[in-house]
Image (cartoon, grey):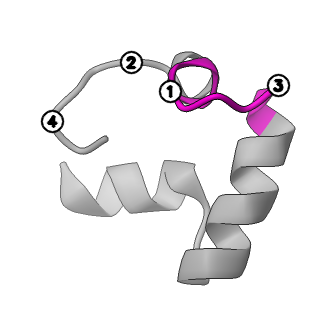
Amino acid sequence: MRSQKLSISDIAIECGFSNQSHLTKVFKQQTGTTPKSYLQQSR
């Protein structure tokens, strides 16, 4: 996720989620942060 320049929506689809909202919900439950925040901190 960190090394790619894909949108969160594209990442969600590539990971098998039906949409960005579902990825964000699951990601935040597992990590305590949103995918957007995670990407901003790691770039």
Name the disc covering residue 3, or none. 4
Quadrant housing residue 3: top left
Residue 24 percent across, percent down from the top left: 72, 52
Res. 15 image quadrant: top right
Q: Quadrant of the N terminus?
A: top left
The answer to the question of whether label 1 and label 2 lie on touching residues, with beta carbons closer than 8 A, is yes
| Label 4 to label 2: alpha-carbon separation | 9 Å
The reply to whether the magenta stretch includes residue 4 is no
Tell me the amino acid under the disc marked 3. Ser
Along the viewing direction, whichever of 16 and 43 lies nearer the viewer:
16
Q: Is residue 25 above or below residue 22?
A: below
- Per the image, the residue denoted by label 2 is 6
For the point 35% across and 52% down, the residue is: 40
* Label 4, label 3: how far apart the Cα atoms are: 22 Å
Please name the residue shown 38% across and 18% down the image: 6
| Magenta region | 11-20
Please report whichever mark, 4 or 3, sits nearer to the chain's N-terminal start. 4
Q: Which of the two residues, 5 or 29, is positioned nearer the viewer here?
A: 29
How packed is label 3: few (under 14 Cα within 10 Å), some, or many (20 or more)?
few
The residue indicated by pointer 1 is 11
Mark 1 / mark 3, whichever is N-terminal: 1
